[in-house]
Image (cartoon, rainbow, N blue to C red):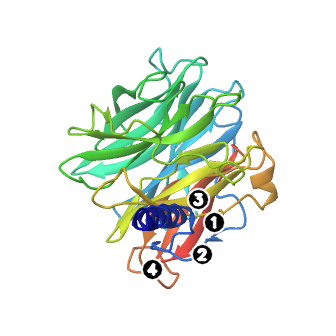
Amino acid sequence: MMKRNLIFALALLWILAASLTLASPTTDLPFGPWTRASNDAILSPQGATWESAGTFNPAVIHHNNKFIMLYRAQDAAGTSRLGYAESTDGLHFTRRPEPVLSPETPYEKDGGVEDPRLQKFGDTFYLTYTAYNKKDAQLCLATSLDLIHWQRKGIIVPAYKGNWNVAWTKSGAIVPEKINDKYWMYWLGTAPSKPGKTDKTDQTALSWSTDLLHWTEATTTPVLPTRPGMFDSRVAEPGPPPILTDRGIVLIYNGADDHLVYRTGVAVFDRRDPRKLLSRTDQSIFAPEKDWEKVGQVPNVTFVEAIVLVKTKDEGIVQKGNRYFFYYGAADKYVGVAEASLK
């Protein structure tokens, strides 16, 4: 009897230790504390047409010694398109006069194309984006060789389907390398309301693919769930494509609380098993502070969608020290950029 009690007690201690590991702040981060690289927005609405209401939620990649940004641009009617801008220093961007991706298909009409993420494999750029037709939002894919001309590949994760998703699909963050001969993508789904509750919660799912076009859900439950009473109690949504390190898959994510204030969190998954959550931050690492992050089309939002590793040898870079730039949408109206030193 005593032996059985001892085994039971040890099992409880193991479970408690495991839960504390998942709840404790992660130390497996490749970057230090975040600060704003610019105290002002680096992109703002302009003109009276396709980007007059908002320019926000950007994807950014460093290519041919330039920072290329694809940003969500919204007109006065609420229709979104993707604009193109480029920069030599990552802070001052010059825009093309016309969007590079506009709504065309039935699943994009009227609502538009939104919230891009960029990843590159070989010579091809892969763009995940949300298609919205004022009824449904669904995760889609397009490809390009030059970041300007895009070929649609269609809906890759349909709405209202999946192992636990009951609503829209969004926010496809593709892991930059194959793991176990598969591509992996974190994305956003909506979990059903719990018994006795009326509010659904947006949480992170995971899918795998062998060709980047056809995706299979990898788990039966969210891999990054919301947490009651915390900064991510209502939403835990993938941000930029993850960073791969020796110690894990580092996923920056956008968390929202019950008041829908959007802050930034970080989760680390197992490098050998992208389904396994190793740790996550208990506190947000970045949050709305500036007036232009608090006041806009949607108040109190910092929404990170892009990471770029900035090296001192890069053309046009005059600041000292290798570091990361993190690009984010602010209040669904502006683009901001934060930075952190490389560990």
Of label 3 and label 1, which has the lower sequence position?
Answer: 3
Question: Label 3 to label 1, Cα distance in Å?
Answer: 6 Å
Kind of residue at disc 2 = Pro
Q: Which residue is mark 3?
A: 265
Farthest residue toward the left? 181
Of the numbered discs 4 and 3, the one sitting upstream in the chain is 3
Q: Calculate the distance from the C-alpha at mark 2 to the C-alpha at mark 4.
A: 14 Å
**x, y (%) of residue 272?**
27, 59
Name above or below for residue 110 compared with residue 5. above
* Helix, strand or loop under label 1: loop
Q: Which residue is mark 4?
A: 322
Per the image, the residue denoted by label 2 is 33
How packed mark 2 is, by other alpha carbons closer than 10 Å (few <14, some 14-19, many 20 or more), is few
247 with respect to 188 (left or right): left
Three-letter residue code for mark 3: Gly
Q: Residues within 10 Å of mark 3 (few under 14, many from 20)?
A: many
Q: Quadrant of the C terminus?
A: bottom left
Contact check, label 3 and label 1, Cβ < 8 Å: yes
Q: Which residue is mark 1?
A: 285
Q: Give the residue drawn at x 35%, y 60%.
A: 270
Secondary structure of the residue carrying tag 4 is: loop
SS state under label 2 = loop
Measure how far apart labels 2 and 1 are at the Cα level. Answer: 8 Å
Q: Are marks 2 and 1 in contact (CB under 8 Å)?
A: yes
Return the x and y of residue 63 as percentages of the image width and height. 35, 59
Q: Which amino acid is tagged 4?
A: Asn
Specify the farthest residue to the bottom. 320
